[in-house]
Image (cartoon, rainbow, N blue to C red):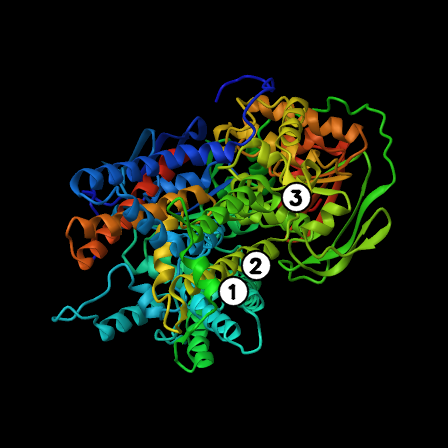
Amino acid sequence: MTTQTSGDVAQEPRRVTLRSVLNNAGIGLALLALILFFAVFTEHFLTPNNITNILTQITINLILAVGMTFVILIGGIDLSVGSVMAFAAVVAGKAITLPGFGPVEAIALAIVAATLIGVLCGMFNGVISAYWSLPSFIITLGMLNIARGAALHVSDAQTIYSFPLAFEDFGSAMIYGVPVVFMVAVVLVLIAWFILNFTVFGRLLYGIGNNEEAVRLAGHSVYWYKVAAFTICGLTAGIAAVVYMARLNISSPIAGIGFELNAIAAVIIGGTSLSGGRGSVIGTLLGAFIIGVLANGLILIGLSDFMRQMITGVVIIIAVVLDYYRAKYTAS
Amino acid sequence: MAATPVSVAPAPDPQEAFLNVEGVRKYFGGVKALDGVSFSLVKGEAHALVGENGAGKSTLIKILSGVYPYDAGDIFLGGAAYKPANPHEAKESGIQVVHQEFNLLDHLSIAENISIERLPKTRYGLLDKAEMNRRAREALDAIGLSDIDVRSPVSSLGIAHRQLVEIARALQSKSQILILDEPTATLTERETKRLFEIVENIKAEGVTIVFVSHHLDEVFALCDRVTVFRNGKTIATDQIADMTPEKVVQRMVGRHLEAQMTDATKEQCYGEVALKVVDMCTAANSKDKGISFDLRYGEILGIAGLVGAGRTEILRGIFGIDPIRSGSVYRDGKEVRFKGPKDAIVSGIGFVTEDRKDEGLILDMPIAANVSLVNLMEVATSGIIQFAAENKQAREGGARLKLKYGKTADPASSLSGGNQQKVVLAKWLARNPKVLLLDEPTRGVDVGAKAEIYSILKDLAREGVALLVVSSEMPELMTLADRILVLAEHEVQGELQRNEFSEENILKLAYGQHQ
């Protein structure tokens, strides 16, 4: 603490982002090291085709992880996003295959249906857990089952297919080798970054994660902010459902099993604290990349998928241990 | 396994001290918690520790029970140096504490709670329930609770019985010294009497009792000797027989502080009644009689009382944090019923809470973000924060309060206690409150910053803000307040005008020693 008395006029105004960049430097370096490692030890890692592959592979996890970041920042968790995504995809699949609509109307209907389902499920999670101050772990575990059951029920456990061609085209479209769906995910990251760093809403989400009581005593309605965070998480599950349908041209009621865990892993590896209040969506972006690069690179190197899974697990644990030390040093 | 005292006890002489505390000091960072504490315990006596809030009693107990190490001085137990590394070692040495707050596991049985530190095992390493229940039975019988089933869960017991189960647990391990920290705080009169009978019996068996209490009548009813604490020091130890409650109060206060009537002659002209509270009962107050007072613009009203007298609850009730059970609050003559802090803030009230870390500040967030927390909409346009405006607000607030800081972007945790408290004040002042509630406004703040905060608060009053200040520090109230209400057990015991201010008068009312 310096003893300069209130004289600083010109200074960078965005402490939160500056700090998150510093925090993310470590994650960025880890990602860079991984990329270098695989570039040196495999032949095909840095080829355009493989890069396109990686971007495609991480897209859905990244979209889910963006919403998950909001929930984890307020100290919550959402275990239901994988199931909600499947439920949204099945309902949207029903909508898109309704007879009597042109392709544009059908696609629009599907997008509305998927996002609406996502928003409603997320809002449900938020209202129940915030109103009664119940652990979101339990509530969203319930929603995980509700949404999965609903997906199976609505689809009669059948996979839905034969979507309009324009939809498939969107799913496989590339611009300079970058999948359009990945660009959608990056746009979501940027929107989330803006919300979290530049709006009153975002500021209060960080505040709630750090010290809910202080925010409440400052006259803010903690309840609505919590509901909003869960609703955003549901919304991204709905968007992920649309991307999933466009990429695979099917809606399966058993899609997305375990996706919630990958999304949580991306957020945690990205440096967001599970206890809330600290972290950034840029970190989440890097976290999703680390998981994707590991998955791709380890297979290129010749390891089995089982080994890949083990190593991803180790990385999650390392990330959390590092986070423990980071929290300890920033506290002292 | 019976507890074996580690001390090599000399031939027991009942008159000889067997615990000696000599010049013990304890610091937390730069803060002196204990600044030379000396006293001794004689076998089989009941020894009272009294003093104002924060005088050092609790710290000493935590040292004796192995929670904190001490920094200087000596403690001898039975002639050997005593320096417990952890609570377990303290217990092994025969020092048991029954804490103010309960340490029971609600959903486990009474027997399990009593044996939790040393659960009996069968030959096969399984829990020996029969033995556990037998021991618990014995422990409860020893304190006269033969009518209670040891297998029932603790959650089925009333508060008084829980207290007794704690005592039974403490006694189970063959204690030499039993420390009771405010044991009667939650008990009714009848339960207190029962507790005292039990304590007398324990004492008769040769256990030494250390009794910490705010209630002097209890001290005089139960104890043989009394040691008075003040500002982290022990003042004196006396035989109860030689003392009167008045003398003890005098010792607690000392003659060091004649009330600072700096501007007692100040011409007082207050405005209209800003806040009127009529017969307000908070949820924590189980009595029928509520609290009533008027607070005028430009006035500083102090609220004194011991911990647990219901001071903070009044502020929380007014501010709409906790529901009010009965009674009413008027703001500018109109009855109001705040559903939450938001309503209170809209009506022009601010609340500087007691606990900076838990309620006041978001420590990891920048100073600017903390200052703008109440007033975010003022520094934002259509929900987007204008960082320039936010920083300006923080700098202006900082300048007004002489805040010492590096950058407004530094986290609040980088500041000293006094400057953190100024950030909390700046947060509320950014909103230009008409009524400001303050709970322990200078807790953990160094002397220099204290004086600055006092002058800020007085300036606010001069500008016409109505201030309601709760404080445990009597010099603080006597410096700041125009009037002081003294509370005890959720009741107004009396009101003191400036010319009646003295620590003695406040304490007499706070301890219920009516004139």
Chain where mark 3 sits: B
Most foreground residue, A63 or A215: A63
State the separation of the CA atoms marked 2 and 1: 13 Å
Q: Answer with mark 2 or mark 1, whichever residue precedes in sequence.
A: 1
**The disc numbered 1 marks a residue on which chain?**
A
Where does label 2 land, which residue?
Answer: A227
Look at discs 1 and 3 and give the one toward the viewer: 1
Q: Where is residue A286 drawn, in percent x and y?
A: 37, 43
Q: Residues within 10 Å of mark 1 (few under 14, many from 20)?
A: many
Of tags 2 and 1, which is closer to the observer?
1
In this view, A135 is above or below B241: below
Q: Residue tagged by mark 3?
A: B383
Q: Is residue A290 above or below residue B372?
A: below
Q: Tag 1, which secondary structure?
A: helix
The answer to whether residue A287 is left or right of residue A20 is left
Do discs 3 and 2 belong to a common subunit? no
Quarter residue B105 falls in: bottom left
Q: Quadrant of residue A23?
A: top left
Quick one: SS at disc 2? helix
| Residue type highlighted by circle 1 | Gly
